[in-house]
Image (tube, rainbow, N blue to C red):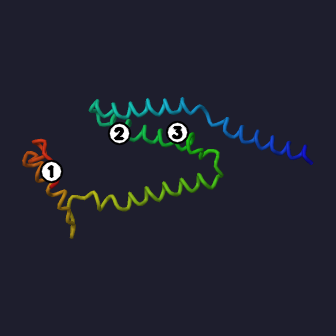
């Protein structure tokens, strides 16, 4: 009986050791994420709109995927976890798509955005206090 217990313990130890051995090299992934961070910071400095969009959003998606796959271990989780994450992302995109047309409008029926109107009026008149280095918020 003692031999079976030792065999079960050693089998569990090997299973846990094998579970952690196939996740990859965390330092390598971390360095890749740092390089992508630097690229996403420097990309908008070029001033080309499509380069800015690719470096801002494209690299953000790649970094999010790498973090979820390698550090959150979503690929090793049960299948329903991937479905749950996908469902949450779909609902988030649906919420944004449903509210963005109204929220991003500058004006409309019964639509008041005093902060936007003040910011656009201030920008039209040369920037006001913000242009002189002072805080625009009081």
Quadrant assignment, res 51? top left
Q: In this view, does 92 lie to the left or right of 69?
A: left
Front residue of 132/86: it is: 132
Q: Which label was assigned to residue 53?
A: 2
Mark-to-mark CA distance, 1 and 2 = 28 Å
Q: Which label was assigned to residue 91?
A: none
Rendered position, 101 above or below 24: below
> Which percent across, then down, holds residue 92?
44, 57
Q: For the C terminus, give its image quadrant.
A: bottom left
Q: Is residue 59 left or right of residue 130?
A: right
| Sequence-wise first label, 1 or 2 | 2
Q: Is mark 1 on a helix, strand or loop?
A: loop
Q: Is mark 2 on a helix, strand or loop?
A: helix
Please tell me how crowded label 3 is: few (under 14), some (14-19), or many (20+) other residues with Cα within 10 Å: some
Front residue of 63/15: it is: 15
Numbered label tally: 3
Please tell me how crowded label 1 is: few (under 14), some (14-19), or many (20+) other residues with Cα within 10 Å: few
Q: Mark 3 points at which residue?
A: 66
Marks 2 and 3: CB-CB under 8 Å? Answer: no
Residue at position x 11%, y 53% in the image: 121
> Which percent across, then down, holds residue 64?
48, 43
Name of the residue lying farthest toward the left: 125
> Which percent across, then down, holds residue 120?
14, 52
Rendered position, 110 above or below 44: below
Residue at position x 59%, y 47% in the image: 74
Which dot, 3 or 1, sits closer to the camera?
Answer: 1
Q: Mark 1 points at which residue?
A: 136
| Sequence-wise first label, 2 or 3 | 2
Which dot, 1 or 2, sits closer to the camera?
Answer: 1
């Amino acid at each position: 009986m003692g031999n079976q217990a030792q065999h079960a313990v050693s089998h569990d130890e090997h299973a846990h050791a094998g579970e952690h051995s196939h996740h990859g090299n965390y330092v390598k992934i971390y360095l890749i994420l740092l390089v992508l961070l630097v690229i996403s910071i420097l990309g908008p400095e070029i001033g080309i709109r499509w380069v800015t969009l690719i470096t801002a959003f494209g690299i953000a998606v790649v970094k999010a995927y790498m973090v979820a796959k390698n550090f959150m271990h979503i690929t090793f989780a049960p299948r329903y976890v991937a479905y749950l994450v996908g469902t949450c992302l779909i609902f988030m995109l649906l919420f944004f798509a449903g509210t963005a047309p109204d929220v991003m409008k500058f004006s409309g029926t019964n639509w008041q955005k005093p902060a936007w109107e003040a910011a656009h009026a201030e920008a039209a008149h040369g920037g006001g206090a913000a242009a002189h280095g002072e805080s625009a918020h009081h």
